[in-house]
Image: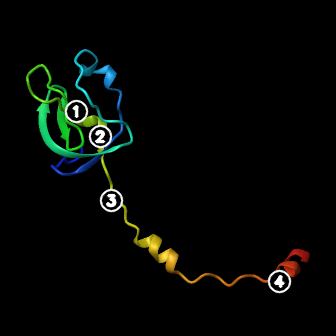
Amino acid sequence: MWDMKLGMQVICIDDDWNNNFQLTHPVGACPIEGLIYTIREIEPMLGGIGLRFEEIQSNLSINGKEYAFISSSFRPVKPTNISMLKVFLNAPQPPAVSQKVLEILHRG
């Protein structure tokens, strides 16, 4: 299990909410697979750890609290390091091969 923190961005990897509690108890907006969400609350829940997100305000659940989504349906967003891409973009380009050289290589 990954280390969850408030403010952390996560990506939804499973949005099959119809196979859980929500089928019989609609909660309004639900996370969508492939989209990124920001954790605003973390709490224990039946079957795991529940997450609430800045981007989603759910309807109230049976116990009078806003519904939390099971953490196993999410993974942390990995920060992208583009420094190596910048190195490649700034690297000197190889000299262009002249048509004459290509003809000589093609004959051989």
Disc sitting over residue 91 in the figure: none
Gap in angstroms between the C-alphas marked 1 and 2? 9 Å
At mark 2, the secondary structure is strand
Q: Which kind of residue does numbered mark 2 sit on?
A: Phe
Q: Residue at x 83, y 78 (%)?
A: 102
At mark 3, the secondary structure is loop
Which corner quadrant of the image does residue 78 belong to? bottom left
At mark 4, the secondary structure is helix
Q: Which kind of residue does numbered mark 3 sit on?
A: Pro
Q: Badge 1 is on which residue?
A: 69
Q: Badge 4 is on which residue?
A: 101
Q: How many marks?
A: 4
Q: Residue at x 88, y 81 (%)?
A: 104
Q: How far across and down, in percent of the image, does residue 88 sit? A: 51, 75
Q: Does the residue at mark 3 contact the one at mark 1 (Cβ under 8 Å)?
A: no
**How many residues crowd around disc 4 within 10 Å: few (fewer than 14), some, or many (20 or more)?**
few
Q: Does the residue at mark 4 contact the one at mark 2 (Cβ under 8 Å)?
A: no
**How many residues crowd around disc 2 within 10 Å: few (fewer than 14), some, or many (20 or more)?**
many
Q: How far across and down, in percent of the image, does residue 34 sit? A: 39, 42
Give the left or right position of residue 52, taking residue 13 as reference.
Answer: left
Q: 25 or 88: nearer the eye?
A: 25
Q: Is residue 8 above or below residue 50?
A: below
Q: Earlier in the sequence, mark 3 or mark 1?
A: 1
Q: Badge 3 is on which residue?
A: 79
Q: How far across and down, in percent of the image, does residue 8 sit? A: 22, 51
Which corner quadrant of the image does residue 39 belong to? top left
Q: Does the residue at mark 1 contact the one at mark 2 (Cβ under 8 Å)?
A: yes
Q: Earlier in the sequence, mark 2 or mark 3?
A: 2
Q: Badge 2 is on which residue?
A: 74
